[in-house]
Image: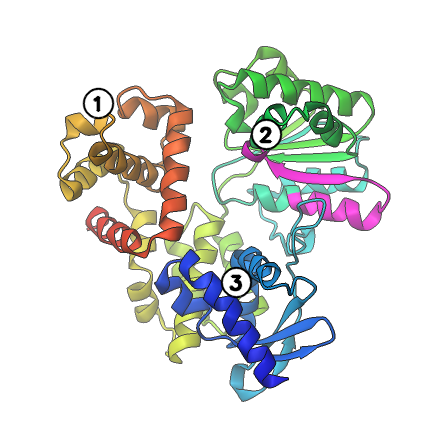
Amino acid sequence: MLNEAKNLWEEILGRIKDKIPSQIYETWLAPTEGESVTQNTLWVKVPNAFFTDWIEEHYHTYIYEALESINQGHLKVKYKSVEGGKERSVPSRIYQPDSSHLQRRYVFEDFIIGESNKFARAASLAVAKSPGKQYNPLFIYGSVGLGKTHLLQAIGNHIKEHFSDLKVYYLGCEEFMNEMIDSIQANRIVQFKNKYRRKDALLIDDIQFLEGKEGLQEEIFHTFNALYEDGKQVVFSSDRPPSALSNLEERLVSRFQGGLVCDIKPPSLETRIAILKKKAVSSGVQVSDEVIMFIANKIKNSIRDLEGALIKLFAFASLTDGNIDVERTQELLTDLLSRNNREITVEEIQKIVGNYYNVSLASMRGKRRMQSIVFPRNVAIYLSREYTGSSLKEIGSLFGGRDHTTVIHAYNKIRKFLDKNSEFNNELINIRKLLIK
């Protein structure tokens, strides 16, 4: 059974290896090993509990696709931590996406409450306890990485747990649009409409993606009306309040504002410390109060960046047995800390990326569509979204008056390319170093 499990897991990893950057593969997947196959479960050894969360969150889709491709789709994958030389089973918190598109790790109990988010959290819990009865629609807005997705999915998971007869569905606005386009092309638009209008709770993330898309706005408007008139719950999230969304039909803005609109602000120092401590405890990794305080003081505007900092520290500790002190933390998190503590402008990004790829500033902002110019331009747009607080519209205007949809397209194109190309990953690391000097 040992050899069977080991060979099976190696075959799975072999099918995954070319799909992700080599550095990431060596960090998160290479240290794992198939241990046994019992009934319908493949058990895999991992260095510690944190690996379980990370692998399931980022690579479970690849893993189950690989299982299907080798005719082993009936198997579930579970993990055992060998931390400290002792084997122990690690509870799995993320599963294959179910029919609701929800991830079970997003629950209210794991959402750290502070002054910056307690109103949004309270409103979300009220909706989850009485779907369709109050605060309909609920509209949550705030910057990237502050917990909007967590709240939307926590609503869905709570409803599923306490109202098992209700049909819940979560998705991003871009996914909604892509599915709508596919349905039109396949002449299945009626089925598409019925799919969403028969839900009891519909949770749509990143609704700002509606901007400038008239057909999508029309479908969202009628879907919302159908659900609302039937007393069904609708929840939206966005990076801005409804009034700040541009190129949106007035009737749709009115619908968004017709329920409860609440925001999430960057977390306070106390909240940041609480988030870091809870993440460390849940991952089974010891981090000193000095390190926690150092990170909390340096990273102020994004929960996602806070967690990203701990991820890097945990990986270092797991793979090297190294001590995590403040000096080591500062060394390991140089890129992340620099990004959080120095304002970088779009123009600065354009110049650095242009110099790196030998493209002039005029070409970066111009209309020419040569690949030798388009690719660096897309890289600059990608970094502008990552490193500046500029809106999509502002970024587009600084790249020759491009609209926000072009900015989104460029960003997504580079993000997908980054996942597949390790050589480009190294290029981007070099450019980032130039940006944070």
Instruction: Say which residue label 3 marks.
Output: 54
Q: Secondary structure at mark 2?
A: helix
Circle 2: residue type: Asp
Q: Nearer the viewer, residue 386 or 169?
A: 169
Mark 1–mark 3 Cα distance, whole angstroms, equals 41 Å
Which residue range is magenta in the image?
Answer: 153-175
Categorize mark 2 by other alpha carbons within 10 Å: few (<14), some (14-19), many (20+). Answer: few
Q: Position of residue 241 (x, y in %)?
A: 54, 26
Instruction: Say which residue label 1 marks.
Output: 366
156 within the magenta span: yes
Instruction: Say which residue label 2 marks.
Output: 182
Residue 330 is drawn in which quadrant?
Answer: bottom left
Mark closest to the chain's N terminus, 1 or 3: 3
Mark 2–mark 3 Cα distance, whole angstroms, equals 32 Å
Mark closest to the chain's N terminus, 2 or 3: 3
Left or right, 9 with reference to 23: right
Image point (38%, 26%), residue name: 406
The vertical placement of 204 against 329, above or below, is above
| Residue 34 in view of the camera | no
Q: Report the mark closest to the observer, 1 or 3.
A: 1
Mark closest to the chain's N terminus, 2 or 1: 2
